[in-house]
Image (tube, rainbow, N blue to C red):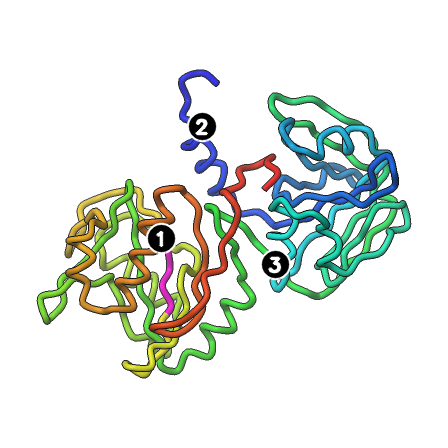
Amino acid sequence: MSDMDPRALRNAFGTFMTGVTVVTAQDADGNPIGFTANSFTSVSLDPPLVLVCLANSSSNYDAFNQAEGFAVNVLAEDQKDVSNTFARPVEDRFAAVSWQQGPAGSPVLAGVSAWFDCSMHNRVEAGDHLILIGKVEAFETSPAPGLGYARGAYVTPAAEAEALAQGAKLIVSALIEHEGKVLLLGNEQGKLTLPEVRVGKEGASAALAKLIADSGVEAGAGFIYSVYEDEAREHQHISFLCQSAGGTPARGAFTELTQTTLMDIGDAAMCTMLERFASEARIGNFGVYYGNQTRGEVRPVGAGGGAGSET
């Protein structure tokens, strides 16, 4: 690469929200193979063509380069575990999923939003990736909402909308990040906190928009980073990770999350969340937390997959 920072370029590619797919085929011995990819797009309706990209460094490279076809399985929102299975080194990925052979011969997975079983139309070498162009021989769709991916984390719009709609006692906070620092405010007890607000009848989206507007900085409404039930404060808490383009905050300041700073966070659950964010930000790889203020689960994702990457 020239003088471009590969990590920065990968992060920039990752701002483009995509779906998540599992691309499958059969190897020369007839065994099912597959990998997770967000580098999928439709190409043409007549003839019906789609494409995916595969890294030259992939262990699947030779098998897919020689395959007579492949299938693209568009994952549903509840299939993050399937994505993770095919994104990591697993001895038998297909043992963990329900699948069958598609009409054109490649494995198609159960429960997906859609699948496209393709014959191989063309292969194109492009930089450090191989572009596979397939002709759609058969396909099927379902009403299941698709799983999204952006900035190194999964996005589940339908599930998030349902959670927000049920938030009678809902607090929304904005984790606004700029160049590794987080916008923190002082609270009435002299401790630090994220910008947060109780959600009223206007809804969570409007509450988040107001938090960002009141911050005085340029920031986009990001994805849900943490969802937890705060039993002590008797409310649900949803924190959105928002990327800022900079500016001078109207209140508070962008602050590095050092151990000293974290000790000044007034809310213990928020402190735990920010400790996780500081750790994940160092490697550019995020997960989503579900649970309560003391116990829960972080559902991790693989390394941020820029366009054209096997993740």
Give the numbered dot on residue 81: 3
x, y (%) of residue 106? 84, 46
Instruction: Kindly identify the residue that appears in the image at 57 percent across and 37 percent down.
Output: 307
Q: Quadrant of the C terminus?
A: top right
Disc 2 + disc 3, Cβ < 8 Å: no
Note whether residue 46 is visible.
no
Specify few, some or many for label 3: CA neighbours under 10 Å numbering under 14, 14-19, or 20 or more: some
Hey, which quadrant is residue 60 in on the image?
Answer: top right
Closer to the camera in the image, 174 or 43 = 174
Q: Earlier in the sequence, mark 2 or mark 3?
A: 2
* Residue lying farthest to the front in this orientation: 91
Name the residue nearer the viewer: 3 or 84: 84
- Per the model, the C-alpha gap separating discs 1 and 3 is 25 Å
Picture residue at 33% right of the left edge, 77% below the top? 230
Discs 2/1, front: 2
Q: Is residue 22 above or below residue 184?
A: above
CA gap, disc 2 to disc 3? 28 Å
In the picture of the structure, the residue carrying the numbered disc 1 is: 242
Numbered disc 1: secondary structure: strand
Q: Which residue is mark 2?
A: 6
Using the rendered view, name the quadrant where residue 251 is placed: bottom left
User: Which mark's residue is nearer the viewer, 1 or 3?
Assistant: 3
Specify whether 37 is left or right of 138: left
Q: Amino acid at mark 3?
A: Asp
Q: Where does residue 196 sit, x and y in percent of width and height?
A: 26, 67
Provide the secondary structure element on which disc 2 rests: helix
Q: CA distance from mark 2 to mark 1?
A: 22 Å
From the viewer's perspective, tell me whether residue 37 is left or right of residue 177: right
Counting residues from the start of the chain, the first of labels 2 and 1 encountered is: 2
Which of 215 and 122 lies nearest the eye of the viewer?
122
Can residue 141 be seen in this snapshot? yes
Amino acid carrying mark 1 in the image? Cys
